[in-house]
Image: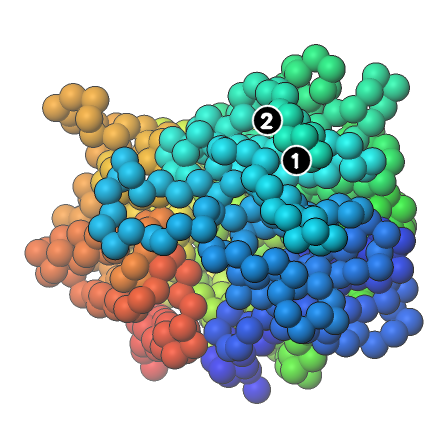
Amino acid sequence: MLTAESIVDSHVPSEPALSPDGRRIAYTVATITKGAPEIWLAAVDGSEKPRKLAEGSSPKWSPDSSTLYFLRDGRLYAEGEPEPLITWRSEITGFLPMREQVVFIAEDETPVPAIRVWSESLRPERLRIFDPRTGEIRTLTEDHVVGVARRQDDGALAVLTWPTPELDPGGLEPRLAVVDPMTGEKRDLGQAPVEATSPVWWRDLDGWHVAYLATPELVGGWAVFDVPVETGEHRNLTAESACPIRLAQVDSGAPLVLVADGLDTALHRLGSGEVSFWRGQADALTSNGEIVATVLSTAHRPKDVHCGPVGGSLTRVSDTAPEFAGISWGSQERLSYKASDGLALDGLLVLPPGKSREDGPFSLVTLPHGGPYDRNADRFMLNWYPSAQWFALAGHAVFLPNPRGGQGHGHEFAASVAGRVGLEEWSDLEAGIDLLVAEGVADPERLGIAGWSHGGFVAAWAVGQTRRFKAALMGAGICDWGMLAATGEFGPLEAGLGGSTGWEGKGPHRHDQLSPISYASKIETPVLIVHGADDTNVPYSQAEFFHRALRHFGVEHDLVVYPGEGHSIRGRENQLDLLRRTREWFSRLLDPA
């Protein structure tokens, strides 16, 4: 039987690291709530049972595959060594082994001031290099480093930097440079687009290139940019129809690109197109050019590490959640339907275990995804926040839509919500609900909606646009885009979604038309509002503002605040409370009998 405890205590793999010789795969295994993360090791061909190697995270191999490095408590360790390789007062946030040295990213070794003065307290994470033979540590850059890649011959580093550690405006003004690890000599390759990340090296007949992921516009998702080192020209190589999500450097030839493709995932070679297609959702990528490893989830299988030849079939080499094997899950069906303007859309329908469409109509809970640049891929739908299988095992059907603004359908599809959140996005979602009602799957008198982050915004928006929902969950959601632009971590992005900031003039402002708070007087649906008290992405003030408005208009609702929690709820007891409270809320309001 599935319990809330089995969900929050389950293990999830991440951060796969393929040894350069292609024989072994290291990866991190962790629960969100219990204990320290662990490094596990498996054979790529599945011939050996995976084994725990050490406590830690972020595994990376030496170029000769002889040594595995990893982080533990912000310190760098080498496999088999009881003491840290590098002793540094501040936390090491990233590293990269070279043949004879290790480069790492960390703040200066200075105490954090007790009084925070904005102009004085910015602490850039600088790139440094450590020589194990001498113990010497040198600082290679003065700027804030957000990404580094080692050229295959160890001759240079590609470094992405921000002018300030702040996401706003640092993420708006990244720069790419090539740094000589021996001399520290730096060659600037110019400004990169917004939030550039994941640099990789590759080489063709014209010489060395650096490729990276970045957002061409504030709203619209990632693209792969390529920079010939000789010219320094930044070129967008991504077709309008593609949605790249990961890049992997290989030993020779062009890098590999993981691409969100509708409900599934494709593997591309940069400049050459698709080389593999994987059903479900892959969200990590590592390769030596011949072997590829990813973390893959399908409709009824949770995330696991899979390996195989590039262009060939994959073998599952981990089994991190065996406790789920004997549970009967709800059937998961792919949906394809049209928006009101004829645009092709997709999504998923999950039914209660043992039920089919013919057993309907069911109470229906709609789960809009976060982001908005995210998606509901055809993966295993179970998590600490209210998820499809958790609702399905309580007897509800669940609709997981992919409206405009998300991944998997190209740049135009993703960028269409700029300054228009809640408009076509909401119409797309409602078209799917109407279809399920018309087909007899959903009972129109027992509809609910629940979302987290941007999904929480969609839920709050929905109950202000219609009275058809009988229950709603607004989790870490947005009710006022102007306030979010002023107080959230990345104001320019929020302004790009909401259409304005509020300082353009006396108004009315565009974001007022797109903010759920503006429609609070029309709400009759009972709303469960949940939020982390220390959320800096979507600050708690969003929940409190919505709560006060609903209280003012006499709308049934509850406000649940989890102390010490950020945008994701991490505490075990808090996760258990959220799962149980949400199931009780929707069962009471959608299935009162």
- The residue that label 2 is drawn on is 176
Tag 2: amino acid: Leu
Q: Is residue 43 left or right of residue 175?
A: right
Q: Residue at 66% of width from left, 35% of height from top?
A: 199
Q: Secondary structure at mark 2?
A: strand
Q: Dot 1: few (<14), some (14–19), or many (≥20) neighbours within 10 Å?
A: many
Q: Residue at 51% of width from left, 77% of height from top?
A: 34
Tag 1: amino acid: Pro
Residue 125 is situated, as x and y percent measured from the top left of the image, at 48, 43
Q: Dot 2: few (<14), some (14–19), or many (≥20) neighbours within 10 Å?
A: many
Mark yes or no: residue 25 visible: yes
Q: Residue furthest top?
A: 231
Quadrant of the frame with the C terminus: bottom left
Quadrant of the frame with the N terminus: bottom right
Specify the color scheme.
Answer: rainbow
Q: Do the CB atoms of the residues marked 1 and 2 lie less than 8 Å apart?
A: yes
Q: Is residue 33 left or right of residue 497?
A: right
- The residue that label 1 is drawn on is 199
Residue 54 is situated, as x and y percent measured from the top left of the image, at 68, 73
